[in-house]
Image (cartoon, grey):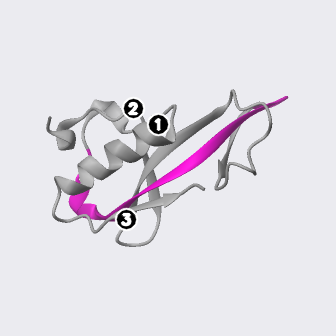
């Protein structure tokens, strides 16, 4: 399977990103919080930081731009799936250095 052509659910208009703009990919946990003014998303770096009720927990692949900022590319429900996809994209693209996983 060519993971470079995988439609990413966070990337605009169903296009695939220009991976040459990124130095690497990053994987991080994200928690959805519902407050009075709507949904809020907060990064969660450690399973011990996550609330007991983990229904709002998901994982995101980010592209780290060579300029330093990040862009969300793809969300998945498990760290295993998210990491696997990020590793496959990195393996198939010589411009990406590695995958940084910010979850323990």
Q: Is mark 3 on a helix, strand or loop?
A: strand
Using a 10 Å C-alpha cutoff, classify the residue at mark 3 as few (fewer than 14 neighbours), some (14 to 19) or many (20 or more): some
The quarter of the image holding the C terminus is bottom right
Q: Mark 1 points at which residue?
A: 75
Q: Give the image location of residue 51, x and y in percent.
A: 79, 40
Circle 1 — which element? strand
Q: In this view, does 22 lie above or below 79?
A: below
In terms of depth relative to the viewer, which is nearer, 65 or 24?
Answer: 24
Any magenta on residue 36?
yes
Lower position in the chain sequence, tag 3 or tag 1 = 3
Q: Earlier in the sequence, mark 2 or mark 3?
A: 2
Most distant residue in the right direction: 36
Answer whether labels 2 and 3 touch (C-beta < 8 Å): no
Q: Do the residues labelled 1 and 2 touch (CB within 8 Å)?
A: yes
Number of residues whose C-alpha sits closer than 10 Å to that of mark 1, classed few (under 14), some (14–19) or many (20 or more): many
Q: Which of these two is toward me, 45 or 66?
A: 45
Which residue occupies 67% across, 54% down? 46
Residue 79 located left or right of residue 43: left
Q: How crowded is mark 2: few (under 14 residues within 10 Å), some or many (20 or more)?
A: some
Q: Which residue bears the numbered disc 3? A: 65
**Range of residues picked out in magenta:** 17-38
Distance between mark 2 and mark 3 Cα atoms: 19 Å
List the single residue furthest toward the bottom.
Answer: 67
Which quadrant is home to the N terminus?
Answer: top left
């Amino acid at each position: 399977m060519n993971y470079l052509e995988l439609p990413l659910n966070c990337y605009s208009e169903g296009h695939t990103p220009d991976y040459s703009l990124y130095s690497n990919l990053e994987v991080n946990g994200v928690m959805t919080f519902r407050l009075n003014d709507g949904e809020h998303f907060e990064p969660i770096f450690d399973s011990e930081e996550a609330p007991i009720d983990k229904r709002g927990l998901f994982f995101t692949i980010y592209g780290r731009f060579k300029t330093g900022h990040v862009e969300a590319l793809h969300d998945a429900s498990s760290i295993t799936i998210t990491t696997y996809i990020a590793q496959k994209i990195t393996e198939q693209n010589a411009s990406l250095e590695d995958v940084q996983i910010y979850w323990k």
